Amino acid sequence: MKQFVFVAALAALAFAIPVSANSRIQIDTVPPEYVPINSPTIRETVSLSSFHFEVNQETGRARVVVEYTYPDQMTYGPDDDAGGPRPTIAQLPGLTYDAAAHAVVYDSSGTKTICATVSEQSGLFGHHLRVRNTGACTVTTNVANHAVDTGWDIRRFRAVDTYFEVR
């Protein structure tokens, strides 16, 4: 009986502790290889190149843009006829532009994390926004096995899963 009470007390305590701001959200799945149109026998491994945030001041919206690369991108070019790995552009629930704070903010269950700071820049080519990542929000990738039930059979494949993470 004492053991049951102890376990019940631990369970109650676990539910009383607030959930941390750490979040991991899958935002895309892309092919793990790129095959250049002019060299169909060559397979290039796709990987994460970079990511950045974009803001729309008028709507208060923000999004994350993920760029992919492959080893011989300089040889085949980013605009190969087959398109190369296309960027992922994702608008996530909870990711917004806070004009008063001049920041891209991710709000998860009331916990706000500043993902990027935003400053206005004027220069030779006019007025634009400079968005700088803070490091609190990142994008990661992971190669994973997938299975899709087509209604008749199960199709298995490998893919690169892309995640937005808040630390």
Image (cartoon, rainbow, N blue to C red):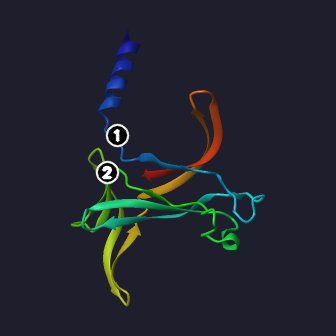
In the figure, is residue 10 to the left or right of 160? left
The image quadrant that residue 147 belongs to is: top right
Where residue 160 sits in the image (x, y, percent)? 59, 49
Is label 1 in a helix, a strand or a loop? loop
Question: In the structure shown, which secondary structural element does the residue marked by tag 2 occupy?
Answer: loop
Residue identified by numbered label 2: 94
| Relative to 45, residue 76 above or below | below
Give the alpha-carbon distance from disc 1 to disc 2, as whole Å.
Answer: 16 Å
Q: Looking at the image, is mark 1 or mark 2 earlier in the sequence?
A: 1
Callout in the foreground (1, 2): 2
40 up-or-down from 31: above or below: below
Count of all numbered marks drawn on residues in the image: 2
Amino acid type at mark 2:
Gly
Which residue occupies the extreme right position in the image? 41
Residue at 73% across / 66% down in the picture? Answer: 38
Around disc 1, counting alpha carbons within 10 Å, would you say few (fewer than 14), some (14 to 19), or many (20 or more)? few
Residue tagged 1: 19
Q: Is residue 82 above or below residue 154?
A: below
Q: Residue at x 76, y 60 (%)?
A: 42
Q: Nearer the viewer, residue 29 or 79?
A: 79
Residue nearer the viewer, 134 or 66: 66
Viewer-side residue, 159 vs 135: 159
Q: Is residue 63 left or right of residue 100?
A: right
Which amino acid, mark 1?
A: Val
Picture residue at 35% right of the left edge, 15% below the top: 5
Residue 91, position in %: x, y?
38, 55
Q: Position of residue 72 (x, y in %)?
A: 70, 68
Q: Residue at x 63, y 28 (%)?
A: 153
**Looking at the image, which residue sits at the far left?**
100
| Label annotation for residue 70 | none
Is the residue under label 2 in contact with that under label 1 (CB below 8 Å)? Answer: no
